[in-house]
Image: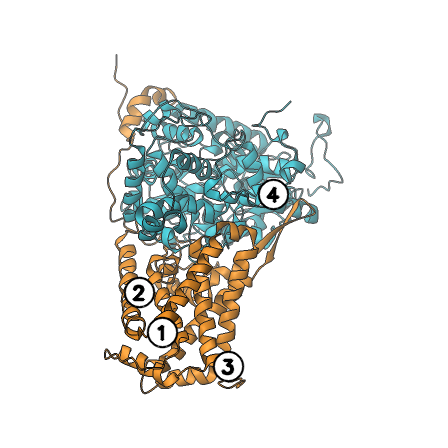
Amino acid sequence: MSKFDEPDYYKQDELLQIDTKPPKTSWMDTPVDFRKGTYIYPGKAKNLKVVDLPNPREWAVEDIDWSLPEDWQRIVLEGMADRLVKYRSFKVFMDTCVRCGACADKCHFFLGSGDPKNMPVLRAELLRSIYRKDFTAMGKIFGTMAGARPLTEDVIKEWFYYFFQCTECRRCSVFCPYGIDTAEITMIGRELIGLLGLYVNWVIEPVANCFRFGNHLAIQPHGLVDTLEFMADDIEDATGIKVDIPINKKGAEILFVTPSGDFVADPGIYTCMGYMLLFQELGIDYTWSTYASDGGNFGLFTSHEMMKRLNAKIYADAERLGVKWVLGGECGHMWRVIHQYMDTLNGPADFLEIPKSPITGTEFKHARSTKMIHLMEFVADLIRHDKLNLDKSRNDHINVTFHDSCNPARAMGIFEEPRYVIRNVCNNFHDMPENTIREQTFCCGGGAGLGTDENMEMRLRGGLPRGSAVRHVQDKYGVNQLAAMCAIDRATLVTVCDYWAPGVQVTGITELVANAMVFTGEKKRTHNLRLEPIPGMDIDDDDGMGAEEGASLDE
Amino acid sequence: MNILVALAAVAGLFVVGMLGGVLGLGWIFGVIIPSLALLLFVGGMVAKVMGWSKSAVPFRIPTSCGQQKSLNWIPHSRLENPHTPLQAAGRMVLEVLFFRSLLRNTRAELVDGRRLVYRTDHLLWLAGMLMHWSFLVIVIRHFRLMMNPVPGFVSFIEATDGFLEIGLPVVFITTLTFLLGVSILLYRRLTDPQVRYISLIGDYFPLFLLLGIGLSGVWMRHLDKVDIAGIKELMVGLFHFSPVVPDGISPVFYGHLFLVSMLLAYFPFSKLTHMAGVFLSPTRNMANNNRAVRHVNPWDYPVKVHTYEEYEDELREKMVGAGIPVDKPLEKE
């Protein structure tokens, strides 16, 4: 018998009974239904203490009394006043919405749940109604008639529920005629309830870990060495190549930073193995850092200040190690932070040089200030200059589609680089329908700190639009793999695909690259990085893993 | 409920304006109130924009809707993902003049009980374009009543707008498209269950106000045939700061003018500020060149971080044990 935090607990037919009819009661008079499977557990006191967050205590979402600080209303309203001055986005977005509803059916959580408060416009109204009450003339005079409402504990509970039912994916912002970005609303909303000590543990534990150990998973330096060595062994089994593992190497040319999910989670580890193989083959002078052992930044899901605190280690270690520039692995929200925030938060990185490929000589001028480039920009350039020896046919058993991760898509616009790379390492590539990719891509349903299990129902519901699009290309083209350059995707989309499009596996792009690459001195490649036999490759019959279905031998 | 309150409010305001005319309060309803309303509009909008401008833009957060500028052989999408302020201005032009983002609108539908499909939905875009552009032309046309002599461009726009030459006086195209646009917006708000659920009085009120202004205008031009010379005398006087209030102006005019005054006065305190707000939206008006040009946060402050020294101090023994280089050697026992 499965439990509410497992996908099997939910019957597809029941989840698909999506009732989009709004309730009879007005949204202000409709309280939150804290149903198991839809919310995330509170942050534990010990984690809050590590990073000096307010009001650390043990509490439960089901409690009537959330033990807020005594003057909680004042704290929230002062917090709002402060942020209205600090963030023009917040202030303009509070004022300009016309409630045209263009955003309504653009949110994956609304599409999957039908809950009107998951319409971006209403998610913002949760906050806007309080803004009106205390910061606008109309709201002060006309109250409810002007869409204002008083700040009560129920409002706080509603905020907690719905701001952790938003993945800050920014899809609604693409469709809004004023560019109102719910990610901004949610970020500010989370900051405000954070002032009261309301966090979710799935965000705040990684934050505490990242602060102390440099990565979300609390992998200690010796643990990272073990992990990478373990991967090196698997790499040798698959390819016969022995890779070096440069760690905290002073004077290296390039610091490589990737999300820590790549170190431990299947299938992220295969992508990580791909990185190691790629760098080995290129012979570039790079280093891992144990101190900056996570490019991911759950501070983004906590507060702007926390984002800065966790991000600081990247430039700090780049400077300490004396590298020339920084290369970033396949991650989603990490790239939002790197691209849109890092230079402002912790720059300028005067001590670094403009990234320049040691192999092709290409100068990445678009990153001349931040001095950090995306691995797909780096690899696309290598392929363009014909610097990789690729045998695409090794991926012929794969029929791949590409999931644009929200942040690299809508907070960066890296659309063509990954597709160029995929097309050059796979013969079978099919994009999903156009309303579900590129700037219109759908979230996995588990970003921005929502990728835990206790909210499984919402994850499956939020994953429906993506799952439905994957199912479409699976049925139409026989797609059997989904590539994603995001560590959260590589964890959460496994669940989404297993549930909505069973039979489709999830992979990182560098895994596909490494599987297609012909390495100098490699042994006969019969197994991929997952150590699964590659169909069509010659395998000795006596090892019991004979070539599959109509395999033709190239050699 | 919200609908009725808004409708009653607009109807009530129109009656008040008419009464002003009937009771011969021409000075109050023809001069003082419109002047105050205009003052409130201009002052209110300036204050609003100043208020927004005073808020900082700590981060550069454009929403990228096209390919970034990176490698020079990958075509960059200049207007959907601008890399320079000029390109960002181009994006704003598309947004402000043509409602670019609304043109993307889709309607999601679950077909066969399990497949999500997205159909193009241009109704909102169309209604928005009809309403806003027609409104602009109508405002310009009204300059005829405020200026003496009538500027050439006003006559030109008027002639173009009336080129169908139907009816006497001629029916302007924008009269019809304006009423159509507002009606579609109202219809959508009433019939789409989601949009209706989120609609406040403040969403219906401006629509009824615009509808009231439009219909009373049609009434005056095509049904009542009001004393246009008297109206022009009043309006020209108003805009030349030498007000006169001629006798015999139809009460419908005072109703119309009162609704216009209410629209002006209401504007800065309502969602109608989106007119100016769209220009200040950081997700639209900034260039996505973050990695090329550093953006400075004006209120940036130092934060508490866990330094490498602290990190190494805690973990030095384990690092040395694992063969990881350290900055400070282990202390000998």
**Chain containing the residue with disc 2:** B
Query: Which hue belongs to chain B?
Result: orange
Query: Which hue belongs to chain A?
Result: cyan
Task: Kindly indicate whether the residue at mark 4 contacts the one at mark 1 (C-beta within 8 angstroms).
Answer: no
Mark closer to the observer (4, 3)? 3
Q: CA distance from mark 4 to mark 3?
A: 46 Å
Question: Which residue matches tag 1?
Answer: B21
The one of B134 and A316 positioned closer to us in this rendering = B134
Q: Which mark is residue B171?
A: 3
Counting from the top left corner in percent of width and height, residue A467 is at: 61, 42
Task: Kindly indicate whether the residue at mark 1 contacts the one at mark 3 (C-beta within 8 angstroms).
Answer: no
Mark closer to the observer (4, 2)? 2
Q: Respond whether the residues carrying marks 4 and 2 are from the same subunit.
A: no
Comes first in the chain, label 2 or label 3: 2
Q: CA distance from mark 2 to mark 1?
A: 23 Å
Q: CA distance from mark 4 to mark 2?
A: 43 Å
Counting from the top left corner in percent of width and height, residue A283 is at: 45, 40
Question: Which residue matches tag 2?
Answer: B41
**Chain containing the residue with disc 4:** A
